[in-house]
Image: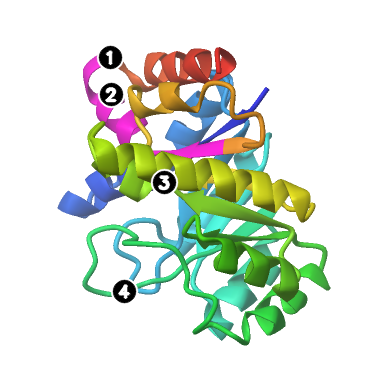
Amino acid sequence: MAGLAVNIDHIATLREARKANYPDPIAAAIIAELAGADGIVCHLREDRRHVQDRDVRLLRKIVQSKLILEMATTSEMVGIALDVRPELVTLVPENREEVTTEGGMDLTVHNNIGETIGALQNNGIPVSLFIDPEPEQIKLAHQAGANMIEIHTGVFCEANGNAKSRQAFAKIVDAAKLAKKLKLGVNAGHGLCYKTIKDFKGLSEIDEYSIGHSIVSRAVLVGLDRAVREMRDLINGL
């Protein structure tokens, strides 16, 4: 059965909209775990637009499942990761002007990614790479020594069930199968919601789904506990 990692970034986004001390992403993480989350995800961006350094350190203290830290490949972030020691680091691309992460990391450009991966792994921290579902990217992730990949599902989720959606999903399926053949762990995330997650039924190659925005959006209406449980139930049925 695939896992569910709940991203609490958008809880912090609501807090930072007013520069208040609520809602608290730490409290959200506790509720998410109690509701069945298998992990908590947070993205400490270079511009600190939502999650703050203090959040990461407090999450490290309270998360009982596993803490997944998303971050850019900078020396500052590597230093923070080595200090905090999450169960997993997911390396992602960052653009200061983007609303959210716009696509997977292009490993043809980040050809020195192996150095960052090695620095983390040598200190006992497994590394995942957030990449598009392209065979070349998966092979490069394998060559770079990553422990796993997270497949960018955004193109599929944004296609709204048209022909482009079917093509995008076929690429996800092929990517997951190729990654498994290369002995990589396979996570998936970006844009997944209560509707699109159903399309993954039968795709056993996915180890874990990373979902944030749709759960937090649902939580505004029904509460976080129920929102996480509903998503957990959907994933249980895949």
Whichever of callouts 2 and 3 sits on the residue coming sooner in the sequence is 3
Kind of residue indicated by mark 1: Val
Q: Earlier in the sequence, mark 1 or mark 3?
A: 3
Q: Are marks 1 and 3 in contact (CB under 8 Å)?
A: no
Q: CA distance from mark 2 to mark 3?
A: 19 Å
Question: Which contiguous range is marked in magenta?
Answer: 209-222
Q: Which residue is mark 1?
A: 222
Residue 57 magenta: no
- Residue 228 visible within the image: yes
> Would you place residue 146 above or below residue 200 in this image?
below
| Mark 3, residue position | 153
Q: Nearer the viewer, residue 229 or 154?
A: 154
User: Circle 3 sits in a helix, a strand or a loop, which is it?
Assistant: loop
Determine the main secondary structure of the stretch shown in magenta: helix
**Alpha carbons under labels 1 and 4: distance apart:** 33 Å
Q: Amino acid at mark 3?
A: Thr
**Quadrant including the N terminus:** top right
| Count of picture labels | 4
Residue 121 falls in which quadrant of the image?
bottom right
Give the mark nearer the N terminus: 1 vs 4. 4
Which residue is labeled 2 in the image? 218
**Circle on res. 95:** 4
Report, in whole angstroms, how far the alpha carbon at label 3 lies from the one at label 4.
18 Å
Seen from the viewer's position, the closer of residues 81 and 88 is 88
Q: Give above or below for 224 relative to 186.
A: above
User: Residue at coordinates 62% horizontally, 55% vertically from top-left?
Assistant: 149
In space, the residues marked 1 and 3 are separated at their CA atoms by 25 Å
Q: Is residue 43 left or right of residue 209?
A: left
Q: Nearer the viewer, mark 1 or mark 4?
A: 4
Q: Position of residue 201 (x, y in %)?
A: 52, 21
